[in-house]
Each structure stands twice: as C-alpha cells, then as structure tokens.
Image: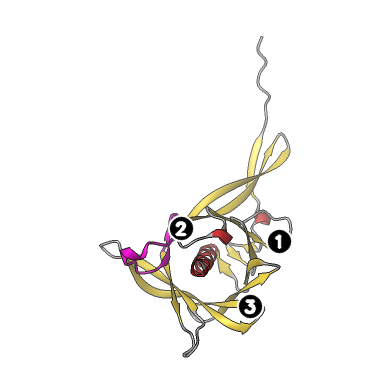
Amino acid sequence: MEEDPPSYQESSQQANVFQPGLQEGVFSPTTFYVAGRFIHSADPGAPPLYELSHSVGFLKDSDRNVRIERLEYSIKRRDGVAQLAARKRHIYDLKHPTGVTGPTFAYHAEPTSRQSPYAFGLETFRPRRLSSAKGYRILRATHALDRRLVRRDVLFSALPVKDNSVRFEWSDAEGQLIAREVDVDGLMTLVVSAMMGAVQRDVLISAWMSRVWAELAKRQ
C-alpha cells in the first residue's frame, strides 16, 4: 500500500526588511555598493538588491548589452521553516551601440518592464569652460517612427567635484542634490541622500551603471 505524500502548508509574505527604508512605496536614503555582478545596500547582512549580466568592473567598450534586474525577496514557510526566496524583475537593458550606426546616445537604456516607463540616454558635457573635467546628463528618451531615440527632458545630472573623497554629485531635474558617487575601500559606492520612489531609484541605479560603463570603456 502506497503511503500518502507528506502534507505541508506553504505561505508567502513580502519581506520588506530586505528592501531597506521602504515605507508606503517610498525609499529612505540608502547607500549602495558594487560587488561583481551585484549591487548591495550597506545594510549589514542584507542580500543584493540588483543583479547585472556582467561583472561591473570588467565592462568593456566591445560589450553591447547589459541586463539589469531588481531582486525582490519574500519569506516562504514550508513545514514551519522560513526560507528566503528571490524573484528577479528585468527592468532595463543597458545598451552601447556601435558608432557606425550613428546612435543618438553612445549609451542608453531600454525599459523591459511596465514598471520601467521610459528609455533614457547618457550624454557628456563640460560643466566649466576651459576644464577637461566631464559631467554627465541622463535624458529621458522616446522612439521616433524610425525607432531612433529622441532626446527629451533631463532626469539627472552627474557633476565631478573638487573633493578627493567624492567623484560625482548627482542632482535631479530641479538641480537638487540626491546622491554622491564615492569609492569606499575600493568599492564603487553611491550614497543616496534623497527620498525616492521605486521607479526613480531603478532609473538612478541603471543610470549610475551606464555612467560607470562609459567611464570604464574610455580607459581601455
């Protein structure tokens, strides 16, 4: 006589403890750092919050597409034992088309989720005359009928600063400081100082990775 399979009860609930600072859909200031293909918060013991298809420190000019996913966590209970489960949400494809195609942006991002409402592109500019330092603008972009990207409004700006401890200061469309890009113990780090929603944070993190990719490619 066959025995019945063991019975179990499984329940799942969203574990906000793994989304640091999340309150009613808005995130409080958070520090992020890069480790290989993953982006972590500075919250000790917390799992990574984003995953890329490539190791960030090894991005090259010859790379054409980098997938970025947001990692969402929940606690599942099976037979009374709590287990951490991760769900990946593909939010953007970061693009670096070949120059021969005459792209609008050397680096841009295409949304891959309904939670990522628009494309954006990265462009460089000189914030001060007679200076070799370059800043970056992140512009919202739309597709023309021929599928080429069209520049729209500015989402963020990243400006170099005369401070050995800070590499870039990030501002929003109104010019308000929202983050500082620093190196901490050799780790690429973004210190976000502003409250923001999930969509804005996804765009900021993706734009940060586009800027890092552009800089690494120039060094080769």
- Is label 3 in contact with label 1 (beta carbons under 8 Å)? no
> Which class describes the residues within 10 Å of circle 1: few (<14), some (14-19), or many (20+)?
some
Residues drawn in magenta = 93-118
- Splitting the image into 4 quarters, where does residue 123 fall? bottom left
Give the mark, 3 or 1, whose residue is nearer the N terminus: 1
For residue 167, side relative to residue 128 (left or right): right
| Residue at disc 1, secondary structure | loop
Q: Where is residue 38 in the image (x, y as percent from the top left)?
A: 60, 56
Query: Which residue does the image show at 26% across and 62% down from the upper left?
Result: 146
Query: Which residue does the image show at 74% across and 59% down from the upper left?
Result: 44
Q: Which mark is residue 63?
A: 2
The answer to whether residue 72 is above or below residue 127 is above
In this view, the mark in front (1 or 2): 2
- Is label 1 in contact with label 2 (beta carbons under 8 Å)? no
Q: Does the magenta stretch include residue 100?
A: yes
Amino acid on which the number 3 mark rests in the picture = Val
